[in-house]
Image: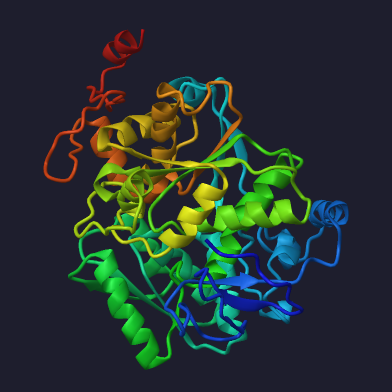
Amino acid sequence: MPSEVVPVNVPELVCFTPSCRERYAITAVLYNCPKCGGLLEADYPKPPLNAAALKKVFRERRMNNTPIDQSGVWRYRELFPFLDDVRNVVTLREGNTPLLEAPLAAKYGGLDRITFKHQGFNPTGSFKDNGMTCGASQAKRLGMKRVACVSTGNTSASMAAYAAAAGLEALIFLPHGNISFGKLAQALEYGAKTLQVEANFDQILALVRVLADELGIYLLNSVNPFRIEGQKSIMFEMLDQRDWHVPDWVVLPGGNLGNTSAFGKALREAHEIGLIDKLPRLAVVQAEGSSPFYDLFKNGGELHPVANPETLATAIRIGDPVSWPKALHEVRTTKGVVERVTEQEIADAKATIGRAGIGCEPASAATLAGIRKLTAAGVMSGSADVVAVLTGNVLKDTDYIYKYHTDKLEAPGGVKIQSTLANKPIVVLNDAKKIAGLLG
């Protein structure tokens, strides 16, 4: 994996491939290393302030009403200083997402206690906003006019909103028929030009990479290194909210693996500059029908893409995750694990989270489903201090919720999902006595 980075005096892009490590200007419009094709990451000089001073600055900014300090991303800007002028920041006051206790979910997962970091409280309802504020800001800094993404839903909603806020034209490419209407509605409302392509996510991403180069469009998928920089803030904010006390585990869903890459990078960097005294273990949970990273982690070697990924958790329906080299490095560095769960396990975990009064999109519930398996297998102790990341809002996929609670939900291929925790609506006559008798 990557060798130790040589200290730099200015922010740069550096190739992630250990045998290459070629460096490029932070303003280069690149998504992969021109020399070897590897992924790129941002590299910075050490912050001018020590850990104690940084913690003080971060906490004081919570009381500041300026837009950049009200952002739960840009509040931590010393930890990703790629912009040379903060006037290019595009913010919708993203971040500021809560840590939520959920005793019912903890019991279901085999834990004494669990804390959910709920990214569904973001402006467009998902963690994508943490990364998109940085991606859109870099696009503005570079003088770009058009931005694009391939999306199964959340990325499109986020990019459309931030492009609108920045005055950029948004071009969104979607797998035709494979998106929640709740997510598509957001992209349409924010004014994005939406193209539904007869192909899967991975095929469309290859197509858009060609179009971006030909038409001078700035790509804002997670292959964009500045998206990863913004998503690091999820960990910084979580640690800040815990007064920099490190949990034993951070559990998250695995789709395109951008969050896994971002979380690991954030934790490593926080440890290197003394913000934290140890690394938590990362646990990445994939849906069974879209789990190439699980297979890689279990079997070793190279990642073998899933040609036709399937899962009702559309946010993680990705068969060829571009960020897998980074993600693998981060999981191994933290002595973490990768698990996979079935559609039934996701559905029941999601219903359990809902009964805790929280609610989330289907992909988010993979975390609790994975935790249940990990504690049952003895990999995760029941007394462990666990933070599980919920990636999206409960209203992102209302059709899924309705079908589950009315016993109509089917997995890909038509396999019926049992509504184990169904809460069916009750049809009643307009009769007060009968309703009173029903309610007791």
Residue drawn at 44 percent across, 31 percent down: 371
Point out residue 213 in the picture as x, y percentages from the top left corner.
39, 88
Point out residue 315 in the picture as x, y percentages from the top left corner.
36, 53
Q: Nearer the viewer, residue 409 or 54?
A: 54
**Figure label count:** 0
Is residue 270 visible in the rendered image? The answer is yes
The coloring applied to the image is: rainbow
Point out residue 76 in the picture as x, y percentages from the top left corner.
72, 60
Q: Nearer the viewer, residue 63 or 433?
A: 63
Above-or-below relation of 80 to 290: below
Q: Residue furthest left?
A: 414
Is residue 126 visible in the rendered image? The answer is no
Where does the C terminus fall, quadrant-wise?
top left
Q: Find residue 421 and report its image quarter.
A: top left
Above-or-below relation of 359 to 173: above
Above-or-below relation of 15 to 440: below
Above-or-below relation of 231 to 144: above
Q: Is residue 237 left or right of 388 when viewed as pictured?
A: right
Residue drawn at 35 percent across, 12 percent down: 439
Q: Find residue 398 and report its image quarter.
A: top left
Q: Is residue 297 left or right of 413 when viewed as pictured?
A: right
Q: Find residue 285 and report its image quarter.
A: top left
Point out residue 30 in the picture as x, y percentages from the top left corner.
49, 82
